[in-house]
Amino acid sequence: MKLFLKYFAIAAAFVFMAMGDSPSFTIHIVGDSTVCTYKDNVYPQTGWGQVIGYFFDASRVKINNAAIGGRSSRTFIEDGRLNEVAAKLQKGDYLFVQWGHNDRDYSKPARYVPEEDFPGYIQQYVDVGKAKGANVVLISPMTMNTGTRNVFSTGKNNYDARGMMQTVAKNNKIPFVDLNMKSFNTYNTTYKDIPDYVTRYLFKTMEPGEYPNYPKGDSDKLTHFKELGSMGHAQMICEELEENLKSNTNLSADAKSALMQLVASLKKRYTITVKTNLSNYNGLITQTQVYPAGSPMTLRVTPNGQTFEKWVDDDCNELSKEQIYYGFKTPARNITYTAMFQGGAACTKIAHDPEDLTSSASGNLQSSSSEEVVKIAPELCATAEKESLWPSPIEMSNPEVGEGTTDSNHGGYTGVGFFNIANSLASKAVYHITADQSATNAKMLIRYSNGGSTTRSMKITVDYNVLNVDFPPTVCVENCTSGWDVWETIVLEDLWIDALDFNLTIESTTDDGGPNIDMIAFDMNGVYRTGCGSTGTSSSSEAVPSSSESKTSLVKSGVESRTIVPSKKAGIYDALGRHVLDSEKSQRRLPRIRRFLH
């Protein structure tokens, strides 16, 4: 009887809060690149913090997604970002915390957090939230695409972020959302027989031409997610919040009361069933989802020999003839979508309820705070022509901070000039760079000239990637007056790039100083000087031409570089990084490229 009264009281409170005039509040979210918000020009890459607002009543709940890529529980604090969040926290707000992905990466000491230190950093977030009167919810990191190995649980060579966050939550009597096990079980149980679905539909893996923002495709299949994957994570988080309210007996009275209010602000969710008109379909297809009205939905099929014709709804209305149909909003009712294939059954209307007019179709995605517009001199946005392998070339003649001079007294540069790094120990050039998307294995090209007689060693820092790189002398062979007129290319490989503003620093490690730096380029779209925009245009005005020519190639005509066999990869590459030969024939006629694996 006591148990019955206990649950009756909880249910009554839930109903009262759902129907009454509940106070409004903000959910502040901290986390990494699996959580943060991405720009439209890198769609479908999405973090769950970007879309979880669809699941809450926008009239009561605001979302402040402060998550940022490339950070761990420690570096987010060291960067001062937790202090920034704390300054916005109000009594009664909520602080959602997810860490683990970058904390476990021992290969990058700048952000690695030893397991024995991880609980202490998580506790700092709890303490900050409590000090502000906010309600903290700890969320374990979603599983990586590693099959049956859950790297965030116990086990050899694992990083038990899940267990450590669960312990901190238990000690503080606050909610623990087990996104880790929820996603692990979904991928390995619900989708056990269709592992390709997880890789191709949920993680950030794309074939060339599947999405306009990725004409070359993308193979980031281990960590980051498409919109469909992150919508699934948001759905799992909401289900876990509801489960905490039902079964978490460890919550304090205040935490349970706050959780009641949070759950009461969730919108009604509807079942979205996806099927085909074939009885023996064996290709991939979007699986059933449970979303609120107004949520973004992706319908997708990957046939296995069958001929796809169109998508239809349960009234047999045609929606699209595209195999990947996205960008539309779900209605306020249970609905069925059917992929129609040639030779399959004819469409038959399916009876359904009318739309629920009491369910809000809108979702609050972001807080009302505006981003600061960074202005930059238009000439700094001048770029060389975009090459297919290097779609993000960046002018480097004028760093934001630099020890050296901007010069144009040697030929062969691509923009308005080049930066001549001073001849002294620790001389450096610092550039502010923006990346609109994340990548775990990016490449960065550096075009340089070193007319000196010795190799110039530099420390290059790309956000938290730190590499020691040698720039050998560039030797004049023909059509030049000195080695300073010769430009060669170095490529840094396996860089982890996150969607954020970061510093790129080139610093001398010897008294000889550094080489002349002409430009850099990335093999991914949407990387540019901060303030320029992804098109190479200044936010303050139109970009001016880079020189007397409106655009120039990455390598000027009439300037040759000597050739070597790449140190890490078989085959020969030109100065744009294009693969040109598999043998060593005619090597001396090709530009030089050195490659460094990070």
Image (cartoon, grey):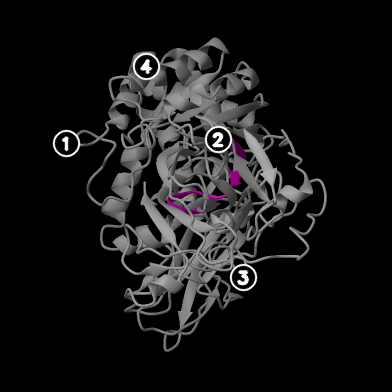
Contact between marks 4 and 3 (CB within 8 A): the answer is no
Q: CA distance from mark 4 to mark 2?
A: 44 Å
The magenta region covers 429-445
Contact between marks 3 and 1 (CB within 8 A): the answer is no
The residue indicated by pointer 4 is 120
Residue 467 counted in the magenta span: no
At label 4, which amino acid type do we have? Gly
At label 2, which amino acid type do we have? Asn
User: Is 154 rendered above or below residue 4?
Assistant: below
Contact between marks 4 and 2 (CB within 8 A): the answer is no
| Crowding at mark 4 (Cα within 10 Å: few <14, some 14-19, many 20+) | some
Name which quarter of the figure residue 56 lies in.
Answer: top right
The residue indicated by pointer 1 is 156
Disc 2 or disc 1, which is closer to the eye?
2
The residue indicated by pointer 3 is 557
Q: How many marks?
A: 4
Sequence-earlier tag: 3 or 1: 1
Helix, strand or loop status at disc 3: loop
Sequence-earlier tag: 4 or 3: 4
Residue 441 counted in the magenta span: yes
The residue indicated by pointer 2 is 423
